[in-house]
Image: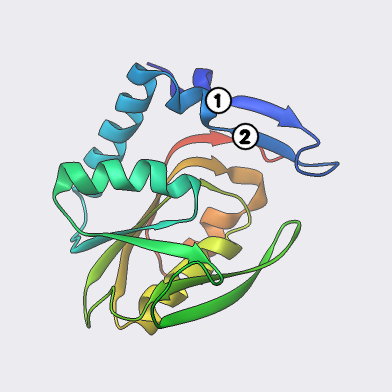
Amino acid sequence: MNLKDYIRSIPNYPKKGILFRDITTLIKDEKAFAETINQIVKKSKKFKVDKIAAIESRGFVFASAVSYLLKKPFIMLRKKNKLPAETFSVDFELEYGTATIEVHKDSIEQNDSVLIIDDLIATGGTAEAAAKLVEMSGGNVSAFIFAINLFDLNGSDNLAKKGYHVENLMDFPGH
């Protein structure tokens, strides 16, 4: 099954010049979604994983299913002011703005190996912020797994240059 066939491309969304890669067409097809999860699970078995973290919100779709299958705790990395207890917080740059993500301070323990899953990597700013949250919490990033890599935006390369292991299921140009 070619998962790329299930990704819809939407030009000029959310703003002019962005070519948005839409996963809703992938996750609404039960066979394509199952294959996506199976591929992520297979890739994740290469790494020591104590916990699985995902970036709000589309990363939750994939990571929660993987967490269930691997029987590992699931940690939500959420937008600012969405978590009720005490948090660590990181500000970062997006391709089209700035944002903040947070994690509960009691989610990750010292030396936990954390696999970070998200739907897509573009410039890598959000992923790098997620890694900082894991590390601020005392954990280690075992790897990143993305469904989609926008290869010409260099996010995967930027993470690799910082010493992180990066896997993805499919590559698309970002523009």
Determine the residue positioned at 82% across, 44% down: 15
Q: Which mark is residue 7?
A: 1
| Residue depicted at 43% across the width and 18% down the height | 2
- C-alpha span from label 2 to label 1: 6 Å
Q: Residues within 10 Å of mark 2 (few under 14, many from 20)?
A: many
Residue 19: mark: none
Residue at (21% x, 59% y) in the render: 73
Which residue position holds label 2?
21
In the displayed structure image, the side of residue 152 where residue 4 appears, left or right: left
Q: Mark 1 and mark 2 in contact (Cβ < 8 Å)?
A: yes
The quarter of the rendered structure image containing the N terminus is: top left
**What is the quadrant of residue 172 in the picture?**
top right
**Circle 1: is it few (<14), some (14-19), or many (20+) Cα within 10 Å?**
some
Question: Is 169 rendered above or below residue 130?
Answer: above
Helix, strand or loop at label 1? It is loop
Instruction: Indicate the position of residue 129 as horizontal and vertical percent values.
Output: 52, 70
Camera-side residue: 2 or 108? Answer: 108
Q: Position of residue 52 (x, y in %)?
A: 28, 58
